[in-house]
Amino acid sequence: MFGGLIGGIFLAVYVDKIFFIPGMFILFPGFLDMRGNISGALASRLSSGLFLGIINPSKLNTKIIRGNLLASFFLAMVVSLVLGTLAFLFSLIVFDIFVPKIILAALLAGIIANAIEVPLTLLATFYFFKKGHDPNNIIGPVITTSGDVISILSLLVAVFII
Amino acid sequence: MKHLKEHLRNLNRIERKSYHPLIHEIHKNYAISHNTLFYIKEYGPHSNVPKTIIRESLKILLLASLIDTFGGLAVERVKDAFLSLLPLVILLPTLNDLLGDFATIVSGRFSTMLHEGVVGKSWSQSKPLRKLLAQILIVALFTGTLASSAALIISMLKGYALGYLLVVKIFFVVLADVALLVTILFFLTVVTGLYFYKRREDPNNFLITITTSVADFGNMIILAVLVSIFF
């Protein structure tokens, strides 16, 4: 809840900038949900691999980890692009507003957010496992708390850049 | 030589996605768990890890994105009313976060109950299940009140003018949203969980994705409806 509240405060402070681009509300829930769907699944796969002994917690540069990171980044890019395109299309069809830059905003924010969240998820999963905890029990709240703040800040940065 | 070629041809015909009979054989002979063998088959040294992950995740991710977009569309329709209510802007990610957490908790606890055989034949008569609903509703209403209070205090500190009626309306909208959605999520979890469990599949693998997407989508729709009614 506190991650959401911090995210909400950022949103309240920069509300006029973030929602300045029409269609941002259409993009918003999908963008917030993405961090859990991609980083949550990544953490879960890594945890399973760690518990089964297939992933070595002291080796980061292995084929399976590289594959997981690559897939997570790729999925994040595709989902961001799809979310941006859907927001663009719905804005055009339902509200008759032509905002192609929302696609760029979604893609850019997706790149920024996942460049932080994916490595953070990897490092946090390994850290908790090495400390003797089950990452499945801890990583969910860590991702949702940090993800809300990171996602909203990434959207803000993307809007500023555009 | 002829036999070997035939065997190789047969081996080649086995699809990667199909359940390989070797998994069962190795599990029986060497007592290695099905989970380990499944993981090795999926992400073993000869598999293309990114391709496997992308192929299996992309469809469900795109579906979740589409569902969330419809939720966002509902709020976009009441955008002006929504943006004029600063406490609700603060509460938007907070409620999404909160309801997603409840969806995860209910899904996880119900899956465990199913595996432990606690639910029984008639779920509507199940005491532990009724207790879970009562617990989750109490916690949801308490955290909803806490989140609303925090959002109202932050709005006040930002200089937002708060009237008595507005405070009551914000509390009502948030508590109605949380109570309604937690109840919907609970019954959705029970019905979907029982469906997958009866099909001899692990509800853990499906419930969280389904319930969190419905939580995000439902939150947006219910908030949009309540805002258009009360503001």
Image (tube, coloured by chain):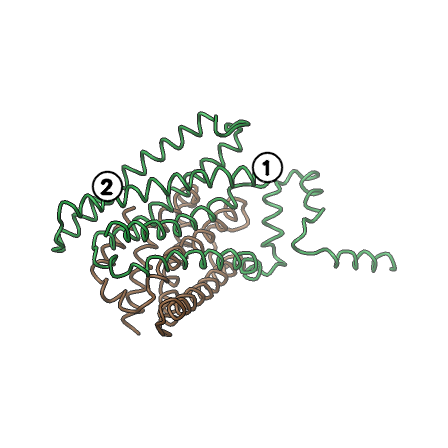
Chain colours: A brown, B green
Which amino acid, by three-letter code, is at mark 1? Lys
Q: Which residue is mark 2?
A: B146
Please give the label number shown on residue B177. none
- Taking the spot 48% from the left edge, 37% from the top edge, the residue there is B190
Chain ID of residue with mark 2: B
- Is residue B73 depicted above or below A41 in this figure? below
Q: Which chain does the numbered disc 1 sit on? A: B
Q: Quadrant of residue B33?
A: top right
Q: Position of residue A138 (x, y in %)?
A: 39, 44
Q: Quadrant of residue B12?
A: bottom right
Amino acid tagged 2: Leu
Residue pictured at 62% horizontal, 46% vertical: B37
First in sequence: mark 1 vs mark 2: 2
Most extreme residue toward the right is B2
**Residue B164 location (% of width, % of height):** 13, 45
Q: Give the residue displayed 29% in from the left and 67% down from the top.
A: A157
Direction from residue B15 to residue A119 in the image, left or right: left
Crowding at dot 1, Cα within 10 Å, few <14 / some 14-19 / many 20+, comes out as few
Q: Report the Cα–Cα distance between label 1 and label 2.
A: 39 Å
Of A161 and B129, the residue lying toward us: B129
Q: Residue at x 25, y 44 (%)?
A: B147
Instruction: Give whichever of B203, A60 is nearer the camera.
Output: B203
Give the residue at mark 1.
B198
* Nearer the observer, B100 or A53: B100
Q: Secondary structure at mark 1?
A: helix
